[in-house]
Image (cartoon, helix red, strand yellow):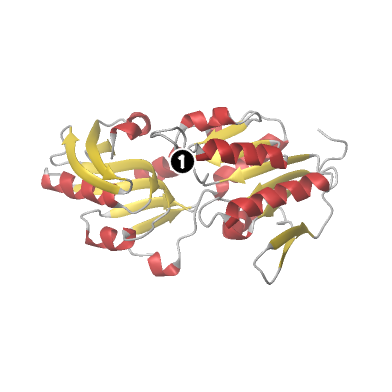
Amino acid sequence: MGLNSDIKIFSGSSSKYLAEEIAEVSKRELGKVSFHRYSDGEFQPSYTETVRGDYIFIIQSTFMPTENLFELLLLIDAAQRASAYKVVAVIPYFGFARQDRKDKPRVSIGSKLVANLLTAAGVSRIITLDLHADQIQGFFDVPVDHLFASSIFVPYINQLNLENIVAASPDMGGSKRANSYASFLSCPLVLCHKTRKRANEVGEMRVIGDVKGKNVIIFDDIIDTAGTITMAADLMMKNGAKSVRAAITHPVLSGPAIERLQKSELKELMVTNSIPIPKEKMIDKITVLSAAELFSGVIEKVYNYQSISSSFII
C-alpha cells in the first residue's frame, strides 16, 4: 500500500444514488466531483479535492447512454493524472456485456473493447456484479472481482417463507446460474427452452421440468424488454405453477417491459439497484434490493488486502 494511502469513494453522475448508499454504509464521505459541460454537449469531470497517493474507488454503472461509460473513462484518467495511488472502477452493471463473442459475421466484441478502453484509461482493478458472461473477466489484464447477487437475493427469498420452491432459468444459457440458486435454496431446478426470431424477440418456449403446484422463482442477470421473463411466467402458470416470481440482477427495463410486466402472471420482480429505475417505471410488482452493503464490504476488503471470497457466494 502507498505511504499514508487513504481510501476515497467517488461517483459518476449515473450511479450517485448507489454511491451515496455505499459511502453511508462504509461510514465515509462521498468524494466531490464537478462536471463542466460545454454548449456542444462535451463534458469534463474534475475532482474538487486532492487524490494524490490515495486509493480511489469510482462507482459508475455503464448502462445506456454510452455517455455513462465515457464519463467513467474520463474519471479514471483524471484520477491517474492527479497521481492517485490506485484507481478501482466499481461497475455494478457492466454495459455491452451481451457482446462477449462473435455470434455472427462482421460484428464487434463490445465487452472486449470496453475492457481495452478501461485498461487504456488506467484502471487498476474492476469490481462488478453478475456479468452476463463469466469469460469477460479474461478480457482484462487487471484483477476483476466478479460478485454475485445471490448474497442479496437468497436472504430475501428465505424471508418470504415459500413452500415447494422451484428455481428456474428462462433459457439454457442461464442454467448454471439457476442451478447455483437451486443449491442455495435446496430446491429442484427447471429450465425453459426458447428459440428467438431476432434479438429481444422470443419465438417459441417450453418448460423442461415439473412446476405443478410449485412456487417458481426465475433467475437471470438482465431483464431488458421483459419478453422472455413474462412469457416464461405465463407458460409456467399454464403448466400449473402456484406462483411465479423473478429475481433479476440488472433492471434495464427498456421499451415495452413495464407494460409486459403489468399484464403478465408474474407476481413479483426482485431486482438490485445496479441501475436506477425511473419513478414512472416503478410498479407494485417490482421490489428493489440494495447492493450497497455488498459493495461496501468488498471495497473495504480490497483496500485492506483481505480475502473477498466470502462475498462471491452465500
| Side of 250 where 266 appears, left or right | left
- The percent position of residue 256, horizontal first and vertical second, equals 31, 61
Q: Amino acid at mark 1?
A: Ala
Number of other residues with Cα within 10 Å of mark 1, as a class: few under 14, some 14 to 19, many 20 or more: many
| Side of 180 where 243 appears, left or right | left
| Side of 127 where 86 appears, left or right | right
User: Is disc 1 placed on a helix, strand or loop?
Assistant: loop
For the point 83% across and 48% down, the residue is 82
Give the residue at the far right of this rendering: 3
User: Is residue 243 visible to us here?
Assistant: yes
Nearer to me, 44 or 288: 44
Give the residue at the far bottom of this rendering: 39
For the point 47% across and 35% down, the residue is 100
For the point 22% across and 35% down, the residue is 193
Q: Which residue is mark 1?
A: 149
- The percent position of residue 6, horizontal first and vertical second, equals 80, 44
- The percent position of residue 305, horizontal first and vertical second, equals 71, 30
| Side of 222 where 194 appears, left or right | left
User: Is residue 185 visible to us here?
Assistant: no
Nearer to me, 148 or 198: 198
- The percent position of residue 2, horizontal first and vertical second, equals 84, 35
Image: 221 above or below 9:
above
